[in-house]
Amino acid sequence: MALLEHDADFQGSFFSLEIDSVTLAYFTGCSGLSIEFEPITFKQGDGSQIVERKRPGRPKYGEVVMKRGLTKSTDLYDWFDEVVKAAGATPYKTASIVIFGRDAKEVARFNLEQCWPSKLSVSDLSSGSDDVMIEEVTMQHEFIDWV
């Protein structure tokens, strides 16, 4: 089967995270870009026949998890720390996950509204390992727009 031009755009792609339109970091892995509706069920009928109906309920957005090799940059920690030190309301941000093709041109974008980091972690430390240390950020959000 021949590789379609569209498919080639997404092979070997990499991702960036923009916060309020400023590129914060580049990543090699991203998961959780999802939306689903909680179904609402109800019964309807004329007494002789009852049918269970389903309608879409509230949308539920997945946690977005991004991974990259550990760097010296503290930008992700600084964003996380801003949430930790918030005295009042959560300091929500507008985030974008930008997907780049092999030619380093933008091929897709996911905008996340009311975004904040809920977890920041690095891989386990082991002096006997040659594995690259991985930095991971988990983000919560209240809306996703695929543009």
Image (cartoon, helix red, strand yellow):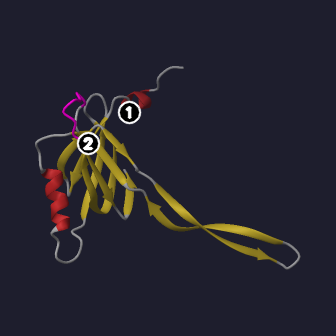
Residue 75 % position (x, y): 14, 51
Q: Quick check: 62 left or right of 87?
A: right
Disc sitting over residue 123 in the figure: 2
Quarter-of-image position of residue 86: bottom left
Q: Do the residues under discs 2 and 1 have CB atoms within 8 angstroms?
A: no
Residue in the foreground of this view, choosing between 13 and 140: 140
Q: Is residue 53 magenta?
A: no
Residue in the image at 31% along x and 54% along y: 138
Farthest residue, direction front: 128
The magenta segment: 124-131
Q: Is residue 76 visible?
A: yes
Farthest residue, direction right: 48
Q: Which amino acid type is shown beneath numbered disc 1? A: Phe
Residue in the image at 33% along x and 60% along y: 140
Residue 10 % position (x, y): 38, 33
**Earlier residue among tags 2 and 1:** 1
Viewer-side label of 2, 1: 2
Q: Which residue is mark 1?
A: 10
Q: Which amino acid type is shown beneath numbered disc 2? A: Ser
